[in-house]
Amino acid sequence: MRTLQLIFIVLTAFSGCSKKPATMPTVDTNKTMSGTLTYLALGDSYTVGQSEPQAESYPFQLADSLNDHSIKVAVPTVIATTGWTTDDLINAISESGITGKTYSFVTLLIGVNDQYQGLSIDNYRQKFTRVLNEAISFANGDAGKVFVLSTPDYGVTPFAQGRDSVIYPQIQAFNAVSQTISKSAGVNYIDVTTVSRTVISNPSLLAPDGLHYSGAMYALWVRLLEPVVTAQLKR
């Protein structure tokens, strides 16, 4: 167990120490001057697309796909860094300079590092509620314009070394919390955990580090996410 943890730390599997927040320029209205929609993506390594080019991350693929379908979306504003827990994300938001600004829609994916670092479910419940409320505020108070993604199951990746029977139930416990809070708040909840487990039969869905995901996996997430986003943006 100790050896596995050291490997994870050395390879920065879930370490955010060496990387500054991937924050894009922000805007302070729901649309740009040209009428283009604005998009805020909040999260951790799964949002920045660790080990893959930025263009392959799910926020950038989502924006590209929406643009391809005639929904004009600006370059995403990303507040995310590998290794962030929910507490880290809350702190980063307060220091990012985006407080008080609003966006056309917001995505949120956070929780894997809370689980990995052994933080309590109760702490996650409290902090996820807080960050979700902030996400809704960034969406100008419109819960329907907020999209929460479930935490993927890294237990089936090579880095987990066959510990999925331990990791998966823990991931699902955290997901149960985020889903319950999301449903109560009236935001959209998208399950990407199920598709994340398909790396067992399709290694091409993994990034070169053997832990995070390739652009092909993020494309599958976008397939699940885009119809929900499109429906909400058109309502």
Image (cartoon, helix red, strand yellow):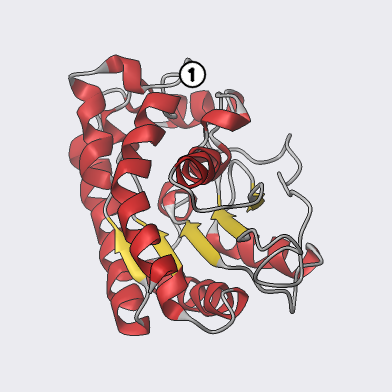
Q: Which residue is mark 1?
A: 209
> Is residue 174 in view?
no
Name the residue: 53% across, 27% down: 6
**Residue 196 placement (x, y as % from top left):** 28, 36
Q: Quadrant of the C terminus?
A: bottom left
Q: Quadrant of the N terminus?
A: top left
Quadrant of res 22: top right
**The disc labelled 1 sits on which kind of residue?**
Asp
> Is residue 127 in view?
yes
Label 1 residue SS? loop
Q: Left or right? Give the position of 114 relative to 79.
A: left
Name the residue: 70% across, 65% down: 93
Q: Left or right? Give the position of 221 relative to 131.
A: left
**Residue 192 placement (x, y as % from top left):** 29, 47
**Residue 49 placement (x, y as % from top left):** 53, 34
Name the residue: 71% across, 39% down: 17
**Residue 98 placement (x, y as % from top left):** 76, 68
The total of numbered circles placed on residues is 1
Q: Left or right? Give the position of 44 relative to 122.
A: right
Give the crowd class for mark 1: few <14, some 14-19, many >=20 residues within 10 Å: some
In this view, 179 is above or below 150: below
Q: Nearer the viewer, residue 57 or 2?
A: 57
Q: Left or right? Give the position of 16 relative to 46.
A: right
In this view, 221 is above or below 147: above
In this view, 122 is above or below 194: below
Q: Nearer the viewer, residue 44 or 216?
A: 216
